[in-house]
């Protein structure tokens, strides 16, 4: 079986360095907001090309703290992509803000900039750009709209470690960007971890306070904050793995090219290769009109595919108040997407087998049925 993702296999090349880093923290006697976190914040800020990085507990907290720091009035509106993971929307509603849903561009599956301006009202305060699957949003028109209406721009870059837009890395394309380092990400920790990047010094200071009970000086609290701190062990692991992120992303691009050029299946909608070298290829997501049969066929042939994501946020029970919305392209995408295995540990032989099997699925899934043979 070719798994969709085997984290032990992905981390194996760096296992000795990871264990050494963990041991170093264990022996240090300092486990929260110490040297490892400070080093990672410096390293990640430099990698993204920004002035500041604030380590936090996870990606959702990163988004929530950004919106909390902006101090928007309750019921302010935030432009969001309809085609995203629910965490993007949770960060908005958890602060008492209202999501304004925008359909995606059919080619990129990211928020369609052409639809944003139509939804802006006097209550609109920000635009959230989610770089889904590792492809940066089309940021130029988003910046232009934000400047025109004096809006903040927030990146949800949880899937875009190392992705670029016009030469600038994800994390440096907005007022503030949120990253997740969940173990499955291109840069993954060994547990939950996250960070915020920004060029705004005052915002960074505010975020440092908010993540630590609203305090920058121990026992003196200037803000109503929370406890959302990147811990020393996860920071140490990330410092190890960051050194290899570009190499791993290069391998992801090679595999994405192999898939996109090798798959010759008229039933499948492939990702666009126009920005192959800019995308981080966190996931290789195709679309198939008979998704369940296709996934079953792959499983029967030893390939584990998965779905990111089966139900759009506006159709989730948690967002019953939005269930009535009709967002047809988003809903179609969520009914068809399939994520093929793609990670740096995948061998060339495994990639070739995946391509071959995907191509063979045409004759199997659409094979004519001989009704008389069963009589």
Image (tube, rainbow, N blue to C red):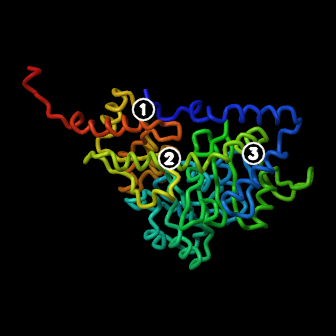
Q: Which mark is residue 230?
A: 3
Callout 2: helix, strand or loop? helix
Tags 3 and 2 touching, CB below 8 Å? no
- Mark closer to the chain start, 1 or 2: 2
In the drawing, does residue 245 fall left or right of residue 262?
right
**Residue at the spot of label 2:** 252
Of circles 1 and 2, the one toward us is 2
**Residue at the spot of label 1:** 304
State how many labels appear.
3
Q: Residues within 10 Å of mark 2 (few under 14, many from 20)?
A: many
Q: Which mark is residue 23?
A: none
Spot occupied by residue 313 in the image (x, y as percentages of width and height):
49, 49
Find the residue positioned furthest to the bottom: 148
- Residue at left 54%, top 57%? 130
- Residue at left 69%, top 59%? 197
Please, is residue 48 above or below residue 352 in the view? below
Q: Residues within 10 Å of mark 1 (few under 14, many from 20)?
A: many
């Amino acid at each position: 079986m070719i798994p969709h993702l085997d984290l032990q296999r992905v981390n194996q090349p760096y296992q000795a360095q990871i264990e050494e880093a963990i041991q170093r923290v264990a022996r240090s006697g300092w486990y929260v907001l110490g040297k490892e976190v400070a080093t990672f914040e410096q390293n990640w800020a430099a990698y993204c090309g920004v002035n500041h990085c604030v380590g936090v507990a996870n990606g959702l907290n990163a988004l929530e703290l950004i919106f909390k720091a902006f101090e928007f009035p309750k019921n302010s509106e935030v432009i969001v992509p309809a085609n995203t993971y629910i965490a993007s929307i949770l960060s908005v509603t958890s602060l008492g803000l209202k999501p304004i849903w925008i359909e995606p561009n059919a080619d990129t599956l990211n928020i369609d900039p052409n639809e944003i301006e139509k939804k802006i009202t006097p209550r609109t305060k920000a635009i959230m750009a989610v770089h889904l699957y590792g492809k940066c949003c089309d940021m130029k028109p988003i910046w232009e709209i934000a400047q025109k209406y004096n809006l903040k721009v927030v990146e949800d870059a949880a899937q875009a470690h190392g992705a670029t837009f016009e030469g600038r890395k994800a994390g440096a394309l907005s007022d503030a960007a949120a990253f997740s380092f969940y173990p499955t990400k291109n840069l993954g920790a060994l547990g939950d971890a996250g960070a915020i990047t920004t060029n705004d010094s005052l915002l960074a200071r505010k975020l440092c306070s908010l993540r630590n009970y609203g305090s920058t000086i121990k026992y003196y609290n200037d803000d109503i904050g929370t406890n959302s701190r990147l811990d020393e062990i996860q920071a140490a692991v990330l410092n190890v793995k960051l050194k290899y992120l570009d190499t791993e992303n290069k391998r992801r691009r090679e595999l994405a090219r192999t898939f996109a050029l090798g798959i010759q299946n008229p039933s499948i909608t492939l990702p666009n290769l126009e920005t192959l070298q800019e995308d981080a290829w966190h996931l290789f997501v195709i679309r198939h009109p008979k998704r369940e049969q296709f996934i079953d066929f792959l499983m029967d042939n030893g390939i584990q595919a998965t779905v990111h994501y089966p139900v759009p946020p506006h159709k989730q029970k948690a967002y019953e108040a939005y269930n009535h919305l009709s967002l047809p392209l988003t809903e179609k995408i969520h009914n068809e997407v399939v994520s093929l295995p793609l990670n740096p540990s995948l061998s060339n032989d495994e990639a070739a087998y995946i391509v071959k099997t995907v191509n063979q699925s045409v004759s199997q899934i659409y094979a004519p049925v001989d009704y008389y043979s069963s009589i």
